[in-house]
Image (spheres, grey):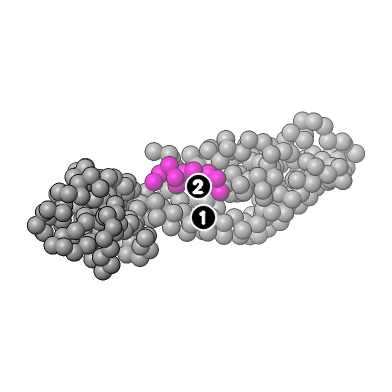
Amino acid sequence: MQQTSGMKKKKIKCPLCSVKFIPRFFHREKLKFEVNAPVHIINKFKLKFSNGGFQPPNIVSRSWVTICPECNYIIKFAAEMGKKEFLDHNSKSILHLREFKEDGKRYEYKFYNLEKPYKEAHYYNTDLIKALKQRMLKALDDLDLSKWGFLYKMWKTDSQIDSFKFLIRFLAYIEKYIASLKIKIDPDTIIAKIGALYVPYELKENIISLIRIREKTIGQYYDLIKKDEALLQNTYIELTMELIFQEMVSLHLNKASIKEDPRALDKEFYYLELKELLQNYLKNTLYISEDTSLFVITMLNRLKITLG
Ligand SMILES: [Zn+2]
C-alpha cells in the first residue's frame, strides 16, 4: 500500500550540526539489521517456542536515506514498515510466510510502503523553473516576434517571398519596432533612430546597410546578390537574438534562487531547462533552422547563467 499524504514541504534539521536543509534526494535503502521479518518457514520453530515479546510491534525494513549537505551526516526515515497484526482466523494449516505465533495467537507482519517524508530539491527546482518559464514566455510574447519569424520562414520556404520582399517587410518591422520605443531623436530620421538603438555597433551598421540596399533596389533597379542575402539572414538572427537578450536581462534570470535553501538550486537542471525553452523559441517561433544551441549558449553566457 502506498501512502499518498504526509510528504512535507519543509526543511530537515540535521541532528548533528543543526543546519536546516532541503534534502537533495532520498534513496531507498534496505536495512542490514532486519529482525526476523518476514518470518520464513525455516525459523518457524524458533518462533513457536519463544515466549512472547520476541517480535517487536513494528519493523522498519527499508529506509529513505539522505545526507546533510553541511556535515554529510546520514539521516534515515522509514520507507517500508512491517506492522505486527493479529489474525483472527486461527486455521490449523501451517504458518504462511510472514505469519508467526505468539502466546498461541496467530500474527502476521503486513508491510506498508511509506512515501518520502520530505519533498526533495527537485520539487523546489521544478516549481522555480515553472514560474520562471512563465515569466520568460510572457516576456517573449510581449516582444511579439512571431510575425518576424513567420516572414523569415516564408522567405526560406516559399518562393512567393523573395529576398526583395523579405528585405522590405523586415525593415518595415524594424521601423515599427523602433517607433514602439518612442525614441526622441533629432534629426527625426530612421538612420538616426537606428543609431540610438541599444544594440551592438556592428548590428546598427548592418541594419543601415540594409536600408541602403533597399534604396538601391527601389531607386536604381538593383537586384540583391548572395552577399546581401547573407547580410539579411545574419541581421535577422543577430537582431532577434539581441532583442530576446534584452528581454531576458530584465528578468534577472541569473539571480533566481530557492528561497528556502539557496544551496538546493540545481544549476544544471536550471541551465538545461532555460536552454531548451530558448532553443524551442528560436526553432518554432523564429524558424531559425541553423544549429540554435550555439546562439543560446552564447546568450546564456551573456546572461551569466552557467552550468556550475
Ligand atoms: Zn549536518
- Residue 122: % across, % down: 39, 51
Left or right of 156: which side holds 273?
A: left
User: In which image quadrant can residue 164 be found?
Assistant: top right
The residue sitting at the right extreme is: 221
Closer to the camera, 218 or 135? 135
Mark 1 or mark 2: whose residue is earlier in sequence: 1
User: In which image quadrant can residue 140 be found?
Assistant: bottom right
Q: Alpha-carbon neighbours of circle 2 within 10 Å: few (<14), some, or many (≥20)? A: some
Residue at image coords 40%, 55%: 123
- Residue 14: % across, % down: 19, 52
Residue at image coords 76%, 43%: 211
- Residue 308: % across, % down: 39, 38
In the rendered image, the vertical position of residue 167 relative to residue 58, given as above or below: above
Spatial CA span between label 1 and label 2? 9 Å
Magenta-drawn stretch contains 7: no
User: In which image quadrant can residue 141 be found?
Assistant: bottom right
The residue sitting at the front extreme is: 92
Q: Evaluate if marks 1 and 2 touch, with contact meaning CB atoms under 8 Å apart.
A: yes
User: What secondary structure predominates along the stretch shown in magenta?
Assistant: helix
Secondary element at tag 1: helix
Q: List the residue tagged with mark 2.
A: 273
Q: List the residue tagged with mark 1.
A: 133
Residue type at tag 1: Lys
What range is drawn magenta here? Answer: 266-277
